[in-house]
Amino acid sequence: MSFQEFLHMGGYAAYVWTSYALALVVLIANVVQPLLQRRRLFAALARKRRRSARN
Amino acid sequence: MMRFIHRLASPKYFYDVAGRIVPWAGWGALILILVGAYWGLVEAPADYQQGDSFRIIYVHVPAAWMSLFIYVVMAAAGAIGLVWRIKLAEIIAIASAPIGASFTFLALVTGSLWGKPMWGTWWVWDARLTSELILLFLYLGVMALYGAVEDKRMASRAAAILAIVGVVNIPIIHYSVEWWNTLHQGPTVTKLDKPSIAPEMLWPLLIMAVGFQLYYVATVLMRARVELLERERNSRWVQELVQPR
Amino acid sequence: MSALSTPRAMALLLRRDLLLAYRRRAELINPLLFFVLIATLFPLGVGADSRLLQTAGPGIVWVAALLAALLSLDSVFRSDFEDGTLEQLMLSAHPVSLLVLAKVFAHWLVTGVPLILVSPLIGVLLSIPSRAMPVLVASLALGTPVLSLIGAVGVALTVGLRRAGIILSLLVLPLYVPVLIFASSAVDAASSGLPVGPQLYILAAMLVAAVSLAPVAAAASLRVSLS
């Protein structure tokens, strides 16, 4: 089977590749979101600490 | 054993243990999902009826399994949190909701993408797709309720009650939708039923399913850790974690 | 005070709620009007072809009933929550779930029963054949209490929120699906002359399950919402 044929997916390329791409996006989003949230939280806590250190 | 559970219930200990599990589960999930995807996309033979479009099931079916599994886990964790007042169970429950909702969404969209070449339309009121749609609404309800209540402790308990009510209702909803579907059945729906699946098609499916399970373990713990930090932000161990003296 | 038995407390609560509803009877008309209005809008939207209405009629009546029930739900606990009565009830020596049951029953009497009474009129508007009318009334009589009971759980969960309306519908409507399916199918079957026993029995089973489980869940929810 050639690479071209593989990409073509027997004529169903649009459906198959959209599905897999979407799965990839969803899976990555669920990993990235907690990481971002964690970073935001740490930034907020650090800000708070600096503010209380100044006073 | 009981001592282990008690220690696990202490936030800091849980935070550390979860932090050690996350990479193992995460990398394991990545490997299994890659292997499953390669096997499913390349190695498995094309279906004699559906051609290559059947390869969507390697995303669709595990996602649908996970959507139900996570809902049950969420309700069980919520019940544990309500009955024994275990904060960590509440956190696990609420951390599960967005992940479950995204798997439900994935199952719906891939089901529709599979249905287009098979049925010739994006959406049919197939029993499984319909129950999946209602499941998505149940997830969104839990998340909306959690988001709407200010006090997070109270919010997670309210969301837990809703999840339990939902889990009691899911079988009723599922069977009523199935029954409804047999009443108004279209002619092409049975195409989705696979009487018996060949082993070289089944193996990648199982690998994908286990990969998704591990992925859920990794992401739910990641979310739970962040949620825990948010709630305990004023405690000393979090302060020290953010800025060690 | 302590001599008050639980059934007596429930009866008193029921009487009080009915009295309060009677004093505010203008508000009670609104869900009913809403019910009639939705049923009027549908033929205007989909066309007045009587064959079309006959097939869609049972579903339309039931969707309208669902929405009307949803609209009136908020009043189960809202005013009692705002004036503090609800907290007093929670502090009483009687099981909260039974008090909730009394309140829901009162609510159903003032919102559900009127829906049942006007439903034949709606049936006529939607050209549901007259042989299906008894089944329509029966399905509503079995179904609307279930709607009130499940709805009470949703209201109990959202009673502390300022803008509960949309969230309430998101919580409650998916849980209404089985009632909708079986009830409208019963009416549908009756209008084409088929037996309706199974659907009505299943509705009755749902009612029994809801009566026994929903008050407990609603009481637990109230405890969370008021904590």
Image (cartoon, rainbow, N blue to C red):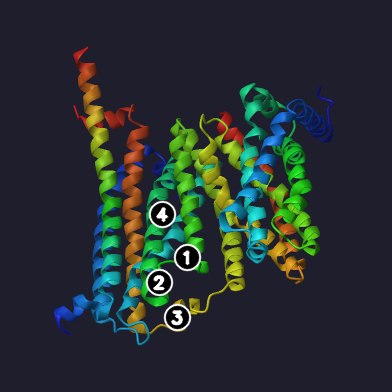
Q: Earlier in the sequence, mark 1 or mark 4?
A: 4
Earlier residue among tags 4 and 3 = 4
Work out whether residue B66 or residue C79 is closer to the camera in this orientation and state it. Answer: C79
Q: Residue at horizontal 24%, vertical 68%?
A: B34
Q: Amino acid at mark 3?
A: Lys
- Amino acid residing under circle 4: Gly
* Rendered image quadrant of residue A10: bottom left
Which is more N-terminal, label 3 or label 2? 2
Residue B1: image location, x then y, percent? 44, 50
- The numbered mark, 4 or 2, whose residue comes first in the sequence reads 4
- Say few, some or many: other residues with alpha carbon within 10 Å of mark 1 (under 14 / 14 to 19 / 20 or more): some
- The chain that hosts pointer 4 is B
Element on which disc 4 rests: helix
Separation of marks 1 and 4 at Cα, in angstroms: 16 Å
Q: Earlier in the sequence, mark 3 or mark 1?
A: 1
Mark 4 vs mark 2: tell me if same chain: yes
Q: Residues within 10 Å of mark 2 (few under 14, many from 20)?
A: many
Can you identify the residue that label 1 sits on?
B129
How far is the residue under mark 2 from the one under mark 3?
14 Å
The local secondary structure at tag 2 comes to helix
x and y, in percent, of residue B118 in the image: 39, 77
Q: Which residue is mark 2?
A: B115
**Residue at mark 4 to residue at mark 3: CA–CA distance:** 25 Å
Question: Please, what is the three-letter code of the amino acid marked with disc 1?
Answer: Leu
Determine the CA span between mark 4 and mark 2.
22 Å
The amino acid at mark 2 is Gly
- Mark 1 touching mark 2, by CB under 8 A? yes
Describe the element under mark 1 as helix, strand or loop.
helix
Name the mark on residue B100: 4
Give the mark nearest the N terminus, 1 or 2: 2
| Host chain of mark 1 | B
